[in-house]
Structures are given as C-alpha cells and as structure tokens.
Image: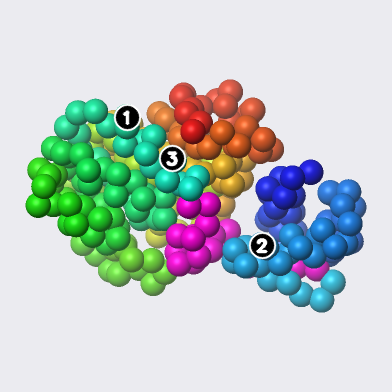
Amino acid sequence: MWSEARHQRIQLMLQRYERVSTTQVMTALGVSRETVRRDFLELEAMGVLKRVHGGAVHIGDEPPIDKRSTLRVSAKQAIAKAAAQRIDRPLTLFMDAGSTTTLLARELSLLSELTIITNSLDAAQSFRQQAAAQSNQIIILGGELSSHLAATTGSSTIAQIQRFHADIALLSPVGIDARYGASSFHHDEATIARAMSERAHQTWILADHSKIGTHSRETYCPVQEISLLISNTSANQREGFKELADRINEMVLV
C-alpha cells in the first residue's frame, strides 16, 4: 500500500475514532510498526494528528495555511494552470482563500478582462503585482480579519457576497467525496464558500489528490451542484474516487 493510501486510511480512522493505537493501524493496514511510526511522523508534520504514547489523536482536518502552502505545491500548480486555461473569455469570478486558489490567482493575473471577487488578501496581492499590464477588476470583500489565514470573514463578508452574481465560483475544499460533496473544517470558511457557490452560475472545485474521498466538518456544496472538479491524475488511486467520478458532473485530472 502506497504512503498516500495509508495516510488517507489513517485520517479516516481518526475522523471516526478521534484516537487510534499503533496496533489498530498495523492491523487495519497490514503494515509493520515501523511503517506506522513513519506515517504518524509525516502526518504530524502536516498538522493532521498528534502522536501520543501508543498511538495518535486527531487534532484537525487541515494544517495551518503556512504549512498548506508548502505541501503538494507542484500538484496544486498543475490544477491552477488547468483551471486558468479554461477561462477563455471575460468572466466574473468568485474566489475563496486557500493555498490552491492563491496559486490560481497568480495564473489568472496573466489574463485580462476578468472581474475577481475574493476575500483572500493573498489572491488580491497576486493580481496587484500584474495590474499595470492587465485590465482586470479586483473586488476585495470586506469583513473581519480571519484568525487563521489572510482573508476576511464574518456576516458582513457574507452580506457583500450576496450583492453579486458571478459566472463561476472557484473554491478549494478540505475534502470532497461522493456522499458529502465539498467540505471545510472551519465554519467561517465553509459559510464563505457556500455563499459564493450559491451566488454563482457554476461551481468549480480545485482539490489536489489528497482531498479526494475525504470529508471534513461542514459541507458547503453537494456533489450534484459541482459543475467541474479539477484534481491530479493520482486521484484515481484514492479510496472513494470511483464513487465520486460516477456522481460528479465533470472531472478533469492533470
């Protein structure tokens, strides 16, 4: 079993039980104690779990943004490029805050005649760096500053989203699966993404392969409401991929 598959199984066990022992994981995965120890170390470095005596405990579904921005960068860049290549005319786009959508902003900043509505300060900065040569309009949503990423949030941000209509909402979840659709760990991020999805003609989900077949605390877009999912080719090795592929409207693997 590849490490990505083991990591996914361990995360699913932690979501269900909150705490797992080394022996439990060894038995469930059919691997050695040393393999489990390495997997625990890697998942702890990603902020997914905390090692304790005899096992590990669940500490959250998503690492902090500074860790996320250094994980699977090439995979996220490929997704961002693929999404930007499908933007072939002037459009109004919602964009939420996250490591993948920040990379997408850099790609979209090379295009022109777009209207970008975002709560992400990092995404807005990416456009600002190219603003002199482009004709894009960037609208930054106001609100409270988030405590865990460079973005605005809260009821005033939601109220502003509801004033707009967009062609596409470009969103990056913590997890996506056939049963729950796109989901996030933090309530405030889920409410922002839900509002953007509801006010857009289409919802595009950008999710690297590690997010396929997993779900987090709060669903914000059911699978049947997702117009397009862009992920990596290795997503087809993830548990739950086939079920998701059967239910999604369109999927692109890069």
- The residue tagged 1 is 86
- SS type, badge 2: helix
- SS type, badge 3: helix
Q: Amino acid at mark 3?
A: Ile
Q: Give the residues in magenta.
A: 55-73
Asked where in the image residue 56 lies, by quadrant, the reply is bottom right
Q: Earlier in the sequence, mark 3 or mark 1?
A: 3
Regarding residue 86, the answer to whether it shows in the image is: yes
Residue 87 image point, x, y percent:
27, 32
Residue drawn at 39 percent across, 34 percent down: 82
- The residue tagged 2 is 43
Q: Amino acid at mark 1?
A: Arg
Query: Would residue 145 appear left or right of 175 to someone viewing this image?
Result: left
> Between tags 3 and 2, which lies in front?
3
Query: Would residue 235 appear left or right of 32 to someone viewing this image?
Result: left
Residue drawn at 24 percent across, 64 percent down: 143
Asked where in the image residue 66 lies, by quadrant, the reply is bottom left
Q: Earlier in the sequence, mark 1 or mark 2?
A: 2
